[in-house]
Every structure is written in C-alpha cells, then in structure tokens.
C-alpha cells in the first residue's frame, strides 16, 4: 500500500503530535520518523508508498518504555513492488528530462515502504504531509502548536492501498492499485483519483465471463478486506441478477489462523461447484493455495480478480484446470527495462533498500555490511541481466503501467497549474509557485481534467475520478508438464485434470426437452429436478421453468421440445374421397348433358313435346350446374370458394326446383281445369313459366347477395373439435343467410312435393307427377338426413356428406324425371307414339302443353 504525495517544499511543517524536544531547540515529533526508502529533492515532490517489504518487523511490547517505531526491514522483499517504486522514479526522471512537460521544473520524490501495514502507511502519509524533519522549531510553544496549525499543505497522493488509508485527509491521492468501487463515491472520498479501473466494472465483467461459460453453480472466496468484501459483494449482486447460484462464499485473510484458512480450503474441496470465483489479494490466494496444495489440489477452474490473476505470487501454482480472469491491460513502457537493469553495485550500495534487494537477489553480502558466515561477498560481477525475478520481469507490465500513468497524471495536472504561455509563445513554468494549501480542490481539478496520451494510451478521469475501464482476459492454463521443483511434482501427483475442454459447473444438469425445471425446496434456483411436461398439449424447451402451451393450431412434437403445426384437414382433390366425389359430380353433369342431347335429338317425339321441352332443357341445364357446383366444395377453402360454395349451390338448386315446380304446376293446372277447352294454359303458358322460374330464382339470388354483402362466408381454422388436427372449413359467416338459402330451397321443394303429390294420381301416360313426387321425396329425405350430419361435427366428412347430398339429390331428380323417358325414347320407341294407349289422346289434350299441338288433333 502507499501514497504518493506532492507538496510544495518549503511550507512550514505541520504538527500532528509534537512534544518539546529535550534539547530545547524546538519540537520533536512524538514518534520520530520513518526514513523514506528512495528520495530525490526537487522543486515539487511526489510521494509514494509501496509495500516493498511483505510485513512489518514484529516487536514485542514490554510497556516499560515507549514502543519502538514500526520497522519494515527484516521481512522478505517484494521485488514486484520494488519494480513499481523504481518505475515511479523512472517516470519522474523522464518528466524531468522532458522539455515539454514541466520545462525547467525539477520533480523530486519521496518513496516510503509501508510493509503491508496500515499504521506504517498512515504514518508515512502524515510524514509526507508534515515534512521531513523529526525535530523542528516553532515560535510558539509546542503545546500550543495545535492552535497554530495550518491546514495540511497541498498534498497530491497516490494511494496504492487495497485497504483504505487517509481517505478523510485532504490528500490528493492518485491510486494505481485501489480498485474498491466504494472509492468512486465522491461524497466520501472527494480527493481520490485512480488510474486502475474500479471493481464495479470488473465484477460485472466477471459475471459475464462466468455466464458465458455456463457456470451457474459456483463457489466464492474473497479476501476479508475492503477489496475482497466490496468486490465480492458487487460480484454476487450481479451474479444473482444473472441467475448464477453460489454454493458457498468464504472470506479469509492471510494473517488469519491457519485453521481458518484450512476450513476454507476444506469447504472448497468438499463442495460440488467446479468453478471458484476468487476476489482476493495475491498474498491471500497464495496462503489458500498452499493450504490446498497440502490437502490435495481439487480439479477446479479458478476465476480470478485482477489482484491475483496476473500476480507472479500465484502463477507458479498449478491451478489444475487453470484460472481465468480479467487482468489490467498489459502495456509497454519504452526505456523502463533499460532503466531497471541499469543498476550498478555502487548505486545499489548507496540506498539501503537497493542494497537489501541486491543482497537478496544475488544471495551475497555487500562489503559494507557485516559479512555473515556462508554468504559470499558481492564483488561487482553480479549481473542483473542474468537475474530472473519479479523485478527484472518486464514482460507483463500491468500495475507498473498504472504507477507510470499516475505519475504522469500528477505531472500533467501540475503542469496546467504552474505553467502558462507568456507573450503568446514561450512556455513559462513558475518553479517557485506555492499553491494555496487551502485550494486542494483547485489542484485536484487540474489533475482530474488531464487528458493526454501516454505510449498510445489515453489517460483521463471521469467525474468520479475513475479511468476508462479496459481489461485483458487472462487464461492461465498449465502447459508445463515437467515442473522443476518438488512442490509442483507433488501437485501434479494429486491433480489429474488436464482437460482442454471448458469445465462444467452446474448444480443440476439442464433438463431434457419435454421437461420443466422444478426447483428443489430450500435450494438455490440452480438446483432443480426435471419434471415431464403434461402431454399432449404442452411442450417445454430445454431448461425452461414452465411448460409452455403450444398455440392452438400447433401441437408438440414427439420429443416435446417444439411445437409443430397440427395437420390441416379439408376435403382435397388429391384424396380418394375427393376424387370419387369430383368424378361422380362430373359423371352426373355428363349424364345430364347426355340426356339433354337425347331429348334434343328426339325433340319432336310426343314424349318430349308432352313434357314441356323448354322447362326440361332448363331443368337439365340447372341439374348440370348442380352436379358441377359440388366441385366448389372440394379443395382448400379460400375466400372465393367459400363464397361460391353455398351461393352457387343455393341458386342452382333453386333454379332446378323451380323448373320442377313449374312442371308440376303445369301438370296440375292442365288437369284441374274444370272446363274442357278452357285454356288454362293461357294463364300458365311458357312465358309465365319462364317468368316464375326467373322470379323464384331471383329471390334466391337476392338472398345470396344480401348474405354475401352483409356477412359473407369465410375460410376458418376450426380447432375446437379435434385436439390433434385443424379443420379448415368455410364458416358460413351469417347463419341466418345460410339457413335462409337452405330454407328457401326446402320451402320450394316442399311446395313442389305437395303439388306433385296432389297431381300424382292424374291419369296420363306421360304424367310426370308421380316421378316428381318420388324425386322430391328422395330430395327431401336426402336433405333432411343431411341436416343432423351437418350440425353435429365439422370436418371433411361433413363436406363429403354435403356433396353427397347434392349429387344424390341431383341424381334423384335426373333418375326419376328423365330416366324413364329416356328409356322409352331409346329402347321402347313404339310407346313413343300418339296412339300408344287408348285414352291417352284425351289425356294428351288435357295435358296439352304445347298450344300448337292442342285442338285439331282429335
Ligand atoms: C534523462 O537524461 C539523462 C541525460 O540527459 C539520461 O542519462 C537519462 O537516461 C534520462 N532519463 C530518462 C528516464 O530518460
Ligand atoms: C533532470 O534532473 C537532473 C538531476 O537529477 C538535472 O541535472 C537535469 O538538468 C534535469 N533535466 C532537465 C531536462 O531538467
Ligand atoms: C565474484 O564472486 C563470484 C561468486 O559470488 C565469483 O564467481 C566471481 O569469480 C567473483 N568475481 C571477482 C571479480 O572476484
Ligand atoms: C513579454 O513581453 C514584454 C513586452 O511586450 C517584455 O517586457 C517581457 O520581457 C516579455 N516576457 C518574456 C518572458 O519574454
Ligand atoms: C480526451 O481528449 C480526446 C481528444 O483529444 C477526446 O476524444 C476525449 O473525449 C477526451 N476525454 C475526456 C475524458 O475528456
């Protein structure tokens, strides 16, 4: 953790806690001070705090005298953090060399080591704010110093901390490492900026990653710190929204008792989730991995936050299935490697921290220090070029680049504050400028508004002081089969999981199609049983919570995972029934035409003449149409065929019946005429016959026109009657219209029947009345039986029945009225004479239909 602080160098020191110095020369800081590890004087000084040592030196408190100040020296060095610190000095040197950025200004630095201790970091921060001298003098007495305090001087800070420090101080911090989303809250942290993206983005990105691979059952571990807790909270909230279930969520910290870390490791091992999301610092992950290594590394897929997923502390661990996560974008910083390598023994000897680094890296002792037994003396032949450690590894500059950017951001902010163009061209920087310490906000604004390009990357801050979030997807996959150390060999031994496939991590396997999920009681939504859908009217696609009903014209397929349209039923020309009916109707029409031809050829014979040939031909014509109109009932119902069906049927049948009616009336009138010779036929001669046929037909035409205009029939998909098929039928549109058409036909046929019945006994060889009676009987019988069939159930058979009724009633007419006559004409021509039977002449006279044949004949 750390703070980079910049302040104007000769501001008076600010005392936080001070006591009069025993020498009487001035005041002394109560607790002494910690020397900076790397310093350089300058006009403006940027401070930095890095965790160069991994932990503070533990001291035993005797409570007999004032405790020693915390010391960092003594624990292991984190070479990576040293690289960060050196990168900061590199950036400052670059800026110092630059002629464009802060020309003529010399930047200095004070870099402190916090050794992972919040208290050391806090002290370092105060020290940077206050000044450097442990003993200083004030005109007033030290006891009154608090009243003479000036507000903290202009401090530009860079908190590198994952846990927070000095957030409430008016310290301008530009963090390269603090990712907590909470720091974007400018109410609480008004002077905080950072170059590393907020965890808010990372948590969302991790959730997308987990979702992408279909891992709905995961474990979660986190550092028990601000970083881990807030990051994991953001992750869990987003994961919950995406339907990802968490089997366990464990927190630990590297300083926790070992038993606790072991418990976490055991939870991880015994859980069923194969994917573990870890929002943790690298140091914590290392502790956990060591524990897991001891217990046996389970075959897990790790999903890591940026803090550890690219950290060299954990990369040596074979993470079995590997680790994926988002790393900070890798960058190239030209000249940095040369700068880092350009460290001589002499330079190293000059700084305690570099000296320590040198000794630790080369495992030798510098001559200046006491030479321990066994350790060789460093003699200058050591070469950094041949050294391979986190300090020299510049292949993955991620956080280093954040440090670099932060220093440049501070420099650019300072530049806009102190440099101004004079006389329109020359740039002048005021090296002596002492910004008003009260104007922390003012300086902060200068830094927040920077917008510059650094090695091709744009650096800027949003209103919350956050940079534009960019990450790199990191996928660690162990390909090193032969690991050198025993540790790794052990690990390979316990871990047999070298699969290149994406691992699976689900609580319940996805449900097969045709089933639905039923969440198990008391378990997260990702744990469920698969319950079959009710068949046959429901289907369920895989992984849905509910079985879905197919639309009414569709039907689940045999697998039950999709709806397929139900078969559509209608009487078509391509099926046997349709073909037979169509053929019968054509045959019937041909028969009617053939009879017409026979009648025409024998139009002068008595039998034809006696039977009112004009009406007969009209009747045959209408019967032809009746046969043909049944064709409109076959085939896929369409708008037109539906409209044609019943109307053509109605009109042709009325034409037909009215012809028959005409014939019947003629017969009846001829015989009912009381006075022989009185010319009844004058009142019902051919013109009247034609007119009546026309009138009867027109009434039906009128009904049909009304029906078609008001509520015409239309094709309709009937799904009500059958579950497994759709009936494509013609909806009559208006039932009144339909029954009016049928009723009118019925009325006419009934009239016809009654009249024919009355006329049936009249004597005549050629009297048609009994044939008409008979045909009407057939006609009515057919249509009366048709009604229940029609009303009961729709479907193609109803249509077939209707066609059958049309054809059979037409046939009945043809057969009863024309067949006997044809038979006589063709096969018994001897009967087809005027003299065939005694008495027929009278009858013929009275039956006289053709006026020209009346009278004079006898
Ligand atoms: C700064 O300039 C000096 C000499 O002018 C050079 O030796 C040094 O390498 C430069 N530093 C950087 C970081 O560019
Ligand atoms: C950079 O700093 C060095 C001292 O470290 C100084 O000698 C040099 O002049 C500075 N360079 C520029 C360009 O200011
Ligand atoms: C320096 O010490 C190394 C061993 O640490 C030794 O191999 C090397 O020869 C020495 N070089 C000189 C010049 O003494
Ligand atoms: C700017 O111009 C004024 C007069 O126009 C001159 O006196 C002054 O020296 C100039 N300053 C610089 C920095 O060139
Ligand atoms: C920074 O400047 C670039 C162009 O110079 C602009 O596109 C970008 O929006 C600016 N960014 C911010 C945060 O102002």
Image: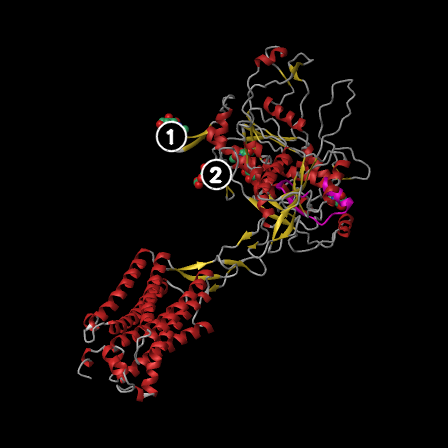
Q: Is residue 607 above or below residue 5?
A: below
Is residue 734 among the parts visible in the rendering? Answer: no
Q: Is mark 1 within 8 Å of ligand 4?
A: yes
Q: Where residue 208 appears, x then y in whole percent?
A: 57, 46
Q: Where residue 338 appears, x then y in whole percent?
A: 60, 43
Ligand 5 is found in the corner quadrant, namely top left
Is residue 700 among the parts visible in the rendering? Answer: yes
- The residue at 26%/79% (across/down) is 843
User: Which label's residue is closer to the chain start, 2 or 1?
Assistant: 1
- Label 1 crowd (10 A; few <14 / some 14-19 / many >=20): few
The residue pinned by badge 1 equals 423
Measured in 3D between alpha carbons, the distance from the residue under mark 2 to the one under mark 1, in whole angstroms, is: 25 Å
- The residue at 59%/27% (across/down) is 167
Q: Which residues are magenta?
A: 287-312
- Label 2 crowd (10 A; few <14 / some 14-19 / many >=20): some
From the viewer's perspective, tell me whether residue 271 is left or right of residue 857.
Answer: right
Q: Quadrant of the N terminus?
A: top right
User: Residue lying farthest bottom?
Assistant: 830
The residue pinned by badge 2 equals 452
């Amino acid at each position: 953790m750390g703070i980079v602080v910049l302040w104007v160098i000769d501001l008076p020191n600010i005392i936080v806690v001070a006591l009069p110095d025993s020498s009487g020369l001035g005041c002394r800081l109560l607790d002494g001070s910690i020397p900076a590890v790397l310093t350089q004087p300058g006009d403006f000084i940027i401070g930095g705090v890095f965790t160069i040592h991994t932990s503070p030196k533990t001291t035993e408190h005797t409570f007999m005298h004032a405790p020693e100040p915390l010391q960092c020296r003594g624990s292991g060095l984190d070479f990576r953090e040293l690289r960060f610190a050196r990168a900061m000095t590199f950036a400052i040197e670059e800026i110092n060399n630059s002629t464009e950025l802060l020309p003529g200004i010399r930047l200095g630095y004070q870099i402190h080591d916090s050794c992972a201790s919040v208290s050391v970091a806090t002290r370092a921060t105060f020290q940077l704010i206050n000044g450097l001298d442990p003993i200083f003098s004030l005109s007033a007495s030290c006891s009154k110093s608090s009243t003479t305090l000036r507000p903290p001087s202009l401090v530009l800070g860079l908190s590198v901390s994952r846990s927070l420090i000095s957030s409430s101080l008016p310290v301008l911090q530009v963090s390269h490492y603090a990712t907590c989303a909470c720091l974007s809250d400018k109410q609480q942290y008004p002077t905080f900026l950072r170059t590393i993206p907020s965890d808010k983005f990372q948590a969302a990105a991790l959730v997308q990653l987990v979702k992408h691979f279909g891992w709905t059952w995961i474990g979660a571990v986190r550092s028990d710190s601000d970083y881990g807790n807030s990051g994991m909270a953001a992750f869990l909230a987003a994961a919950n929204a995406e339907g990802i279930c968490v089997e366990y969520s464990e927190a630990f910290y590297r300083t926790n008792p070992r038993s606790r870390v072991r418990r976490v490791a055991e939870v991880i091992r015994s859980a069923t989730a194969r994917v573990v999301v870890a929002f943790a610092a690298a140091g914590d992950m290392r502790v956990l991995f060591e524990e897991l290594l001891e217990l046996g590394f389970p075959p897990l897929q790790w999903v890591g936050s940026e803090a550890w997923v690219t950290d060299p502390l954990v990369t040596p661990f074979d993470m079995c299935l590997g680790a994926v996560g988002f790393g900070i974008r890798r960058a190239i910083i030209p000249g940095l490697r040369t700068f880092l390598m350009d460290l001589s023994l002499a330079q190293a000897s000059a700084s305690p921290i570099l000296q320590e680094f040198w000794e630790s890296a080369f495992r030798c002792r510098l001559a200046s220090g006491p030479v321990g037994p066994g350790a060789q003396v460093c003699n200058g032949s050591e070469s950094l070029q041949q050294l391979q450690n986190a300090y020299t590894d510049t292949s993955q500059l991620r956080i280093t680049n954040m440090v670099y950017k932060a220093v440049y951001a501070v420099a650019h902010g300072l530049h806009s504050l102190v440099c101004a163009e004079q006389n329109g061209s020359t740039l002048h920087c005021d090296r002596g400028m002492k910004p008003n310490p009260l104007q922390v906000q003012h300086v902060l604004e200068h830094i927040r508004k920077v917008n510059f390009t650094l090695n091709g990357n744009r650096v800027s801050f949003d209103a919350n002081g956050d940079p534009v979030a960019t990450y790199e997807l990191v996928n660690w996959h162990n390909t090193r089969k032969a690991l050198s150390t025993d540790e790794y060999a052990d690990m390979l031994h316990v871990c047999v999981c070298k699969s290149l496939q994406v691992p699976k991590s689900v609580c319940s396997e996805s449900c097969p199609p045709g089933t639905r999920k039923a969440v198990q009681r008391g378990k997260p939504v990702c744990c469920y049983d698969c319950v079959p859908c009710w068949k046959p009217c429901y289907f369920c696609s895989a992984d849905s919570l509910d079985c879905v009903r197919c639309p009414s014209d569709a039907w689940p397929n045999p697998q039950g995972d999709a709806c397929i349209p139900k078969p559509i039923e209608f009487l078509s020309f391509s099926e046997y029934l349709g073909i037979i009916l169509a053929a019968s109707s054509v045959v019937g029409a041909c028969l009617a035409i053939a009879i017409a031809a026979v009648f025409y050829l024998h139009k002068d014979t008595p039998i034809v003449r006696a039977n009112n040939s004009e009406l007969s031909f009209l009747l045959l014509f209408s019967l032809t149409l009746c046969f043909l109109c049944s064709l409109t009932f076959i085939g896929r119902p369409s708008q037109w065929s539906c409209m044609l069906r019943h109307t053509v049927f109605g009109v042709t049948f009325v034409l037909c019946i009215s012809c028959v009616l005409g014939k019947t009336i003629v017969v009846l009138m001829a015989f009912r005429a009381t006075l022989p010779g009185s010319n009844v036929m004058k009142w019902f001669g051919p013109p009247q016959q034609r007119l009546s046929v026309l009138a009867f037909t027109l009434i039906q035409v009128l009904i049909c026109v009304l029906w078609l205009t008001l509520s015409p029939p239309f094709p309709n998909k009937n799904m009500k009657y059958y579950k497994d098929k759709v009936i494509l039928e013609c909806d009559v549109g208006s039932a009144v219209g339909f029954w009016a058409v049928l009723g009118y036909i019925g009325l006419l046929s009934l009239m016809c029947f009654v009249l024919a019945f009355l006329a049936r006994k009249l004597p005549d060889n050629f009297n048609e009345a009994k044939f008409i009676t008979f045909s009407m009987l057939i006609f009515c019988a057919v249509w009366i039986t048709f009604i229940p069939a029609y009303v009961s159930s729709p479907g193609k058979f109803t249509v077939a029945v209707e066609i059958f009724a049309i054809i059979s009633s037409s046939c009945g007419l043809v057969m009863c009225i024309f067949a006997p006559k044809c038979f006589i004409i063709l096969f018994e021509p001897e009967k087809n004479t005027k003299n065939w039977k005694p008495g027929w002449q009278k009858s013929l006279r009275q039956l006289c239909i053709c006026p020209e044949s009346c009278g004079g004949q006898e």
